Image (cartoon, rainbow, N blue to C red):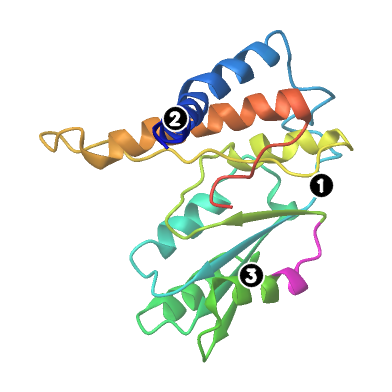
Amino acid sequence: MSLLLSLIVLLGGGLVAYSYVGFPLLLRWLSRGKTLPGPVFGPAAPELPAVDILLAAHNEEEVMEQKVRSTFATTYPLAKVRLLVGSDNSSDHTNALLAKLAGEFPQLRATVFAERQGKPGVMQHLSTQATAPVLVLTDANVFFEPDTLHELVKYFANPQVGLVGAGVLAPPTPPGAGAGVTAQESAYLARENHFKYQESLIWGAAIGAHGG
């Protein structure tokens, strides 16, 4: 019995060591010298495809305006961009904000749900409204940089690419707040995204995109 217990402990310890040390070293070794294959679209390429951005929202009045404005403050051709928002039975000022912003940005389409659908239900509904060949899934509290859309879409110049994952950068920690969870989460996300990048170099696929 003691021998069996020792084997179980050794096996468990070995699996933990492989997860935290062995697998990262294996990825590093297998991905050495590899780069992403194929062409990319240039920032002003006429072949850039249309993009539909899908966003499920529930009571997002604090961030919705900044989200919409960051989406359309893009270097990507605006004529090729639509933002499809589903407000999932929001009880704050989200719906009013969307109505106001839709008057300013004709590429914004808002669907208001009177009953809760849940995020998967909202995204499924929005996907039926989408007509663009490229879909970008996002959250209300994730703000875009001007080049975000191009950095995501440019890889679809390669017909073998079916999904591009983005990295989410945490906002700077306020002075005096200490490192806190934000720094730890940022380090974790950076490590995970690097592993996914290495997986895509090796096998042409990753375990999943951010948030998926």
Q: In the image, is 133 to the left or to the right of 190?
A: right
Q: Tell me the residue at 50%/80% (across/down).
A: 88
| Residue drawn 49% across the image and 25% down it | 14
Q: Are marks 2 and 1 in contact (CB under 8 Å)?
A: no
Mark 2 nearby-residue class (10 Å; few <14, some 14–19, many ≥20): few
Which callout, 2 or 1, points to the residue nearer the camera? Answer: 2
Q: Residue at x 29, y 33 (%)?
A: 183
101 shown above or below 77: below
Query: Residue farthest to the right?
Result: 159
Mark 1: few, some, or many residues within 10 Å (few <14, many ≥20)? some
Image height of 18 relative to 121, above or below: above
The reply, left or right, for residue 174 in relation to residue 122 is left
- The image's mark for residue 123 is 3
* Percent position of residue 169, x then y: 43, 38
Q: Which residues are magenta?
A: 127-132
In three-dimensional space, the C-alpha distance between marks 2 and 1, rounded to whole angstroms, equals 62 Å
The disc, 2 or 1, on the residue closer to the chain's N-terminal end is 2
Number of numbered discs visible in the structure rendering: 3
Amino acid type at mark 2: Leu
> Mark 1 — residue?
49
Which residue lies under the disc numbered 2?
3
Q: CA distance from mark 2 to mark 3?
A: 53 Å
Q: Is residue 31 visible?
A: no
- Secondary structure at badge 1 equals loop
Query: Within the image, what quadrant is residue 173 found in?
Result: top left
In the image, is residue 9 part of the stretch drawn in magenta? no
Where residue 184 appears, as percent x and y from the top left, is: 31, 35
Image point (46%, 80%), residue name: 95
Note whether residue 7 is visible: yes
- Tell me the CA gap for discs 3 and 1: 21 Å
Q: Which mark is residue 142?
A: none
In the image, residue 113 above or below residue 150: below
